Image (tube, rainbow, N blue to C red):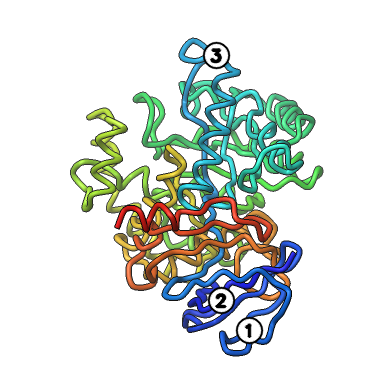
Amino acid sequence: MRTLLQNVTVIDAVTPEPRLNASVLVEDGRIKQILSAADSNALLDCETIDLTGQFLLPGLWDVHIHPDYLSPTDMPLTEQVTLFGNRLQAAMTESGVTGLRCAGAHDYMDVAWKRAFDSGQHVGPRLFAAGHFLTTTAGHFLTSGHALECDGPYGFVKAIREQIKNGVDHIKLNLSGGIMGPAWDLHRHSFLLDEELKAAFDVCRLREFKVMAHATNPVAVKNAIRLGAHSIEHGYILDDECIELFLKHDAWYVPTLAISHLTPQQATNFWERGWLKQRNLSHSLCCRADAAADVHQAGFLKALKAGVKMALGSDIRPLKDAALLELGLWVRAGATPWQALQAATRAGAAICGVGDELGTVEVGKIADLIVVGANPLDDINNLRDLKLVFKDGRIVSDKRKASKEAT
């Protein structure tokens, strides 16, 4: 099957200058050619989609997600699994998020949906699964339902082996506290003993599984990077040595600005205020977030300016809103639209180990693509003007007719 996407501006996530009046030939699910619109007129035997005035980009990635925080008493497990699948599919069809990395899900529901999408049983985004996240007794976010409490070196070793046996892609370790939680779950506190840390990272290294490390303060961040963490999640407090270690060890940073920056006191636009009205966050949580926001932003900017590898992850729900809100927060916190866009495309694929196949608009890459009606490099919120979503070169969401009817 050959499809020609004609007369479009290409933002390829490789070079910051858009390619004007271009055409992209997709064949058998991959990008076959990128050429000028004039040259594409000579191509025969292909379906042509005229995208005049629109913008073609790689599909978006959100590399820190969870299902909704529901216990079996709130909703039966079967319904929770179904809800999570609907959330994942809505992220793709409603917002153009074609790749996601899970940071914790109970009962391996992320593994189940990964297998369903990979097999073609259901059409959905590319999903990288974590299973449960592992923390200590009196550890982080136990009320989420996604945590497993482990104690002692072999408690962590056994839990990690269980995750591997059940089909996860990476191991999520919660090494410190957070902004959400009771008074004993604080982001300035680290939880694991040295022997627990060593055992957990040792078994991951032996089994060649990457560690996604929830690390929120300098002690936790430094321990995780030195022991070989693939990515640091949150990093609410980063000092200069943290930045040096990121660069020395080539570790990734996923800042999840939404956790500290999405509060009534900080909201700046219609979408942020709408999300806050829907979520109805507690006053105590908002106070903790507000108190952490300035230091978090300072560390984010320090890492950005130093050239630390950074990818976009939201850590909020619903998933159809999450990545778009996080993109806006990156720009509000001081990133350029280009930096934010790269974090949500090229970097997202790379942190998941599939950068050779996905994340950019280049010849040979898998055609997971989106089309929007206005330039996101002018305003990152133009990504909300979604027209088309392609997965493997096939249209999985078409909003062009709805847009015409609305006008």
Q: Which mark is residue 40?
A: 1
Horizontal side of residue 266 vs 223, given as left or right: left
Report the residue at 65% width, 44% height from top. Answer: 128
The image quadrant that residue 248 belongs to is bottom right
**For marks 2 and 1 on the same chain, the one whose residue lies earlier in the sequence:** 2
Q: Which mark is residue 76?
A: 3
Mark 3, secondary structure of its residue = loop
Percent position of residue 150, x then y = 62, 24
Mark toward the viewer: 3 or 2: 2
Q: Which mark is residue 148?
A: none
Spatial CA span between label 1 and label 3: 53 Å
Q: Residue placed farthest to the left in the image?
A: 265
Percent position of residue 180, x then y = 38, 32
Q: Nearer the viewer, residue 144 or 182?
A: 144
Mark 1, secondary structure of its residue = helix
**For marks 1 and 3 on the same chain, the one whose residue lies earlier in the sequence:** 1
Spatial CA span between label 3 and label 2: 47 Å
* Quadrant (top left/top right/bottom left/bottom right) for the N terminus: bottom right
Q: Which residue is mark 2?
A: 6
The image quadrant that residue 404 belongs to is bottom left
Report the residue at 49% width, 64% height from top. Answer: 371
Q: Are marks 3 and 2 in contact (CB under 8 Å)?
A: no
Q: Are marks 2 and 1 in contact (CB under 8 Å)?
A: yes
Q: Amino acid at mark 3?
A: Pro
Q: Residue placed farthest to the bottom in the image?
A: 38
Is residue 303 at all visible to an observer of this figure? no
Is residue 286 at all visible to an observer of this figure? yes
Name above or below for residue 237 compared with residue 373.
Answer: above
* Quadrant (top left/top right/bottom left/bottom right) for the C terminus: bottom left
Q: Amino acid at mark 1?
A: Ser
